[in-house]
Image (tube, helix red, strand yellow):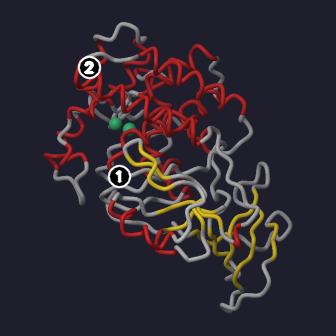
Amino acid sequence: MRLISTTQIQSDMVLARPIYSEGCLILANGTNNLERYIRNLNRLGIFEIYVEDDISEGITIPDVITSKTRNICKETLRTAFKDFTQKGILQVDTMQDVIDHVINEILENQDVLISLNDIGAADEYTYTHSVSTTVYALMLGQRVGYKEDMLKRLAMGTILHDIGKIYIDRDIMFKEGKLTDKEYEYVKKHTILGYNALKGCKSLSELSRIISLTHHEHVDGTGYPRGLQGDELHTFSKIVAVADVYDALTSTRCYRAKWSNRQAMDMLMQSCGTKFETELVCQFLHLIAVFPNGTQVRLSDGRIGIVKEQNPGMPLRPMVRILQEADGTSKDIYDVNLMTELNIVIAGDEFDYITEDKSKQVG
Ligand SMILES: [Fe+2]
Ligand SMILES: [Fe+2]
């Protein structure tokens, strides 16, 4: 299996992971003749898909939770947001059941590096992002030593961290292109609006609720809405700040292409001690696959291949299946283990393109 851009779709490829839009299955595993669907996928804001083909045969992409659990989680959240908007009632119990399930799966998969990009339609972004951010936050929370009770509170607060976006005008929320200063100030209000909405929900702990208000604060006081800093912020807020930005950067958005995992990691590292707590970023980087299995990479000697397997503890030196020689010719497929070929490094991956200004990033 590998992740490709829809521009790379070829006739021998078969869909390897299902694609959903608004909770409905639009393309099932095993779908072939994928060229037929490119235009409709792009119209939904889907520009990458997981496929099986000859060259990726035998490559697996492990995830800490199953696609099924991700989708149940997204659907539960969608229903919860809808009920909350229409009836003013937040179904905490139902969400708690799903979260318990997510926590159990994560605890069972502690050794798996997080590598899966969740594919979802652009207008599903809030749900996809909320679930992925929760997975990242839970992995990080577990790594810093939280036990089950605290993980539950952390997860509940994280899955609801952007609930305030239900009050934000969709045309601005999903605007293609950069937000104006005025629009950006308006979108920032999702923090206060979210917290005010959750304040009345007594079955949520204050530790969970506060995440909606504080997930855009920075440890140096430059964040919003209140400019809190250092110890004024609970560790939950600092964890979600890291998880939220990482997921936002590595997701395709209506106003820009996604960043590669490496670019997002670089950004986190550059912001240690300013936006994010250094220790949390260091711990987080241990959890992420820099070059996930199935990623197309270019080696420093010019050869092109796809990542086949991770080498434990060596995220920059995986096993690579070579597809093309430096001179552009293709021989039989063979593997290179970067743990033994130490003079070669990965020079870049297919998502290594820096795009426009990210200063108005709203995760
Ligand atoms: Fe967010
Ligand atoms: Fe947010």
Query: In the image as oriented, which residue stretches furthest toward the left?
Result: 182
- Pointers 2 and 1 in contact (C-beta within 8 Å): no
Residue at 72% x, 86% y: name it. Answer: 325
Where does the N terminus fall, quadrant-wise? bottom right
Residue 110 appears in which quarter of the rendering? top right
Q: Where residue 174 appears, x then y in whole percent? A: 25, 50
In the orientation shown, which residue stands out farthest toward the right?
A: 340
- Residue 223: x and y in percent read 33, 36
Judge the density around disc 2: few (<14), some (14-19), many (≥20) Cα neighbours within 10 Å: some
Which residue is farthest top? 202
Q: Which type of secondary structure does the marked residue at label 1 adopt?
A: helix
Asked where in the image residue 324 lies, by quadrant, the reply is bottom right
Query: Which residue is more in the foreground, 334 or 44?
Result: 44
Q: Is residue 38 left or right of residue 287?
A: left
Residue 250, given in percent of the width and then of the height, sits at 47, 53
Q: Amino acid at mark 2?
A: Ala
What separation in Å lies between label 2 and label 1 (alpha carbons)?
25 Å
Whole-percent x and y of residue 341?
A: 83, 71
List the residue tagged with mark 1: 122
Q: Cβ(mark 1) to ligand 1 < 8 Å?
A: no
Judging depth in this view, the residue of 258 and 181 nearest the camera is 258
Q: Residue at x 50, y 25 (%)?
A: 155
**Front in this rendered view, residue 87 or 189:** 87
- Callout 1, which amino acid? Ala
Left or right placement of residue 286 versus residue 100 in this view = right
Residue at 65%, 51% (x, y): give it.
289
The residue that label 2 is drawn on is: 197
Residue 23 drawn above or below residue 143: below
First in sequence, mark 2 or 1: give its number.
1
Q: Secondary structure at mark 2?
A: helix
